[in-house]
Image (spheres, rainbow, N blue to C red):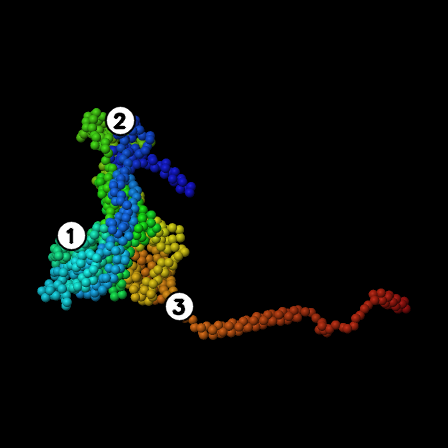
Amino acid sequence: MLLHALLVILAIVTLPKVFAQSCITKSNCSECIQEYGCAWCSEPGPNKQHCYRSGDTQNECFLGKAEDPKSKFTILSNKNLQSQANLDPIQLKPQHVKLVLRKGEEYKMNFQYAQASNFPIDLYYIIDLSYSMKKYKINLALLGDRLIETMRNITTNFKIGFGSFVDKVDMPFVNTEPNKRKKPCSNCVPAYSFINYQSLNNGETFSKEVAAAKESGNQDTPEGGFDALMQAMVCKDVIGWRETARRIIVFSTDATSHIAGDGKLAGVVEPNPGLCFMTDNQYTHDLVYDYPSISHINHLAKQLGFNIFFAIANDNIYSVYEAMQNEIENTATARLNAQSDLLYLITKFYRDISDVIKITDDSSSAVQITYEADCKSKIENGCKAVHAGEVINFVAKIKVLDCSKSKHQIRIKPGTFSETLLLDLDVHCNCDCEQQQKNNSDRCKKKGALVCGLCSCNSGHYGKQCECNSESFTTNDIASCMQSNATKEICSGLGVCKCSVCECNKRQNPDEHIYGKYCECDDYSCRKSSDGKICNGNGKCDCKKCKCDAGFTGEECQCPTNLAPCTHFNNVCNSKGTCECGKCTCESGYYGTYCEECATCSGRKCEELQDCVQCKTYNSGKLKDSCDISCSQYQFNKVKQIKESEETEDSDFRKVCKLPIEQNCVMVFSYFYNDDKDISVDAESKMRCSKPIDILALVFGVILSTIIVGILTLVIWKLCTTIHDRREYAKFENERKQANWNRNDNPLFKTPVTRFENPTFNEMQKKDEQQMQEIQETE
């Protein structure tokens, strides 16, 4: 906390100085006001700067001589949100605004979005009617009425249409031999490029039109589906697209589609212009214009607000259309086979797109706009799990990055809806005083014009007051060429002072420049990336600092501002972290590439993947019959063995899962995120199974082991007692050998006779014996 407080205080103290220093270097009014935070004074007080920090009270400026433009926001149209069935829905508020802004200034604009209930839906079904798709056409005809009924449960304002395609009618796409051209297969009609059988209507005749449509045939494997898709999008009047409706195209085929460049096989090389060429509901320019490119389809689908759903009836080509999801926005892909429920697939697609709202705009690179929402489930520039009628408050952060244009008109759209919020943006890049210049001013020695308080000298003259010419340019006033009196450095050491004005040195490289009032700036000293690009190629070097392009930030423009690198399944960092410099910084306890793992719920994702891993790897489980559809969002790979050491929590995140699958069996797999941000799963090709327990063997084993343990216990006991006895006996023998006994005496015998002696008696006896001895000696 103390460190944070010190940093805040340091910022408060130093930022004004940094701003002031940046302002001082500007040499004219336009440069000054294009630096946000600076203001220009045409007539400053004594020893004051023309360009100074905005709000600096120490810089005196005569009344009416300051240029310090302020932002201005005006609402031009502000109708209330409404979703009544009998009125046109209004989902954005306001609808038209005007904003005046300076370069570098960020303005926060508030607006609201509410998804209208019972919103109109236009659904157009395009089917490949080559002969191999006959059974799917029959299925569509049978399900037509149920499809209409299902969609009307979602909205009563529903319209449906139907068209079909084959291919360009020329070799090598179709067989042009007369008989084959007329009848390419039994019960077939001649080949065609695209036919609109039924424009959008209430659907009373939809099933009949589908059933009546005849199959045809072509010669090569790819089809002309993209020709049909393009015409279906751009032929608004023919198809009957409504302005205020969600536009959905269901594209069903069992083959790949020709793309731009393939038309040259039939001599068709003119690029597709993306215009409508239909007469009597049939495409007429298939042999005039080439197939459209994928990027062209993406551009028009985004511009016109289309959601495209690829229903693919061939597993071998499914991955081709699945890859298009990364190239065409607002697109989804699903497998269409005998087990697929077409109604379920279409309604699921609709719910997926209707539950998500993502704000887009058509701003240029000169304007940076980011969006924030107050919803619970946030995604990049929007929300998911949005309910009809729910009002979401958005904040658009608008920032002008350069002055290449002074006026912009930007359309802000909620997803693929045609409804827009129109933003008229005016950029303050020039000063009013520049339009009021005085030619041959006295203050400029009659040698130049006075512009915003500075002299713009005529050719051949220069100096603060145009007092110098090519013959005389020396001056004693070198202080005007010093940025700081402390350093005493003239023109920052990178130029010469001529007539109180710095003339900067030229660089050997013509693409490198030294500039600024004191030659203090250059456009080559910014940091370079490892591949030698200044500002990582995402900006330009301006006065030794990187000025980032729209979509990038950081000192070296190394960080993308969009949240795409942190977004997975329309969720930014799993709502458990923040996106910083293109990577998720997770909350405490969470980890993983998208903060999808946590210390207390490590098995959650493993359990989510369990059913798909089981059906994909072992062809079992509850998803066995619908595995391809239910698990299409994952990529699977069988491996021989997975080691727990493979698990990581860093940027190369990988999680190892072990889950019981059957009795006595465990499946082991790991998952990670591939380059396309999809989940890839490596699963062991064989389950790890243990053998079942034999109860009888277990009982006999316990009995036998008990007996063995008992015997071993007895043996050990006997061994221990024998060793102990032998040690005691050896000790006895040793003591016996050391004993010094009289062999005539029994050491164990004790006499039963007790003997007593009178000590006095013994003395008298000794005296008697002595007397007897003396008598004998006398004799």
Q: Is residue 761 visible?
A: yes
Nearer-the-camera pick, 462 or 263: 263
> Judging from the image, what secondary structure is the residue with disc 2 in?
loop
Residue shown at 34% from the left, 35% from the top? 16
Indicate the quadrant where residue 629 lies: bottom left
Nearer-the-camera pick, 674 or 360: 360
Tell me the CA gap for discs 1 and 3: 64 Å
Residue matched to label 3: 664
Spot occupied by residue 738 in the image (x, y as percentages of width and height): 66, 69
Counting other residues with Cα less than 10 Å from the Cα at mark 1, is it few (<14), some (14-19), or many (20 or more)? few
Tell me the CA gap for discs 1 and 2: 70 Å
Spot occupied by residue 688 in the image (x, y as percentages of width and height): 37, 66
Indicate the quadrant where residue 347 lies: bottom left
Spot occupied by residue 608 in the image (x, y as percentages of width and height): 35, 60
Of the numbered discs 1 and 2, the one sitting upstream in the chain is 1
Residue shown at 25% from the left, 66% from the top? 338
* 185 relative position to 309: left or right: left
Counting other residues with Cα less than 10 Å from the Cα at mark 3, is it few (<14), some (14-19), or many (20 or more)? few
Residue shown at 33% from the left, 67% from the top? 620
Residue matched to label 1: 275
* 466 relative position to 598: left or right: left
Q: Do tag 1 and tag 2 residues touch (Cβ < 8 Å)? A: no
Residue matched to label 2: 476
Above or below, 610 against 65 in this view is below
Pick the quarter of the image with the N terminus: top left
Above or below, 518 against 386 in this view is above
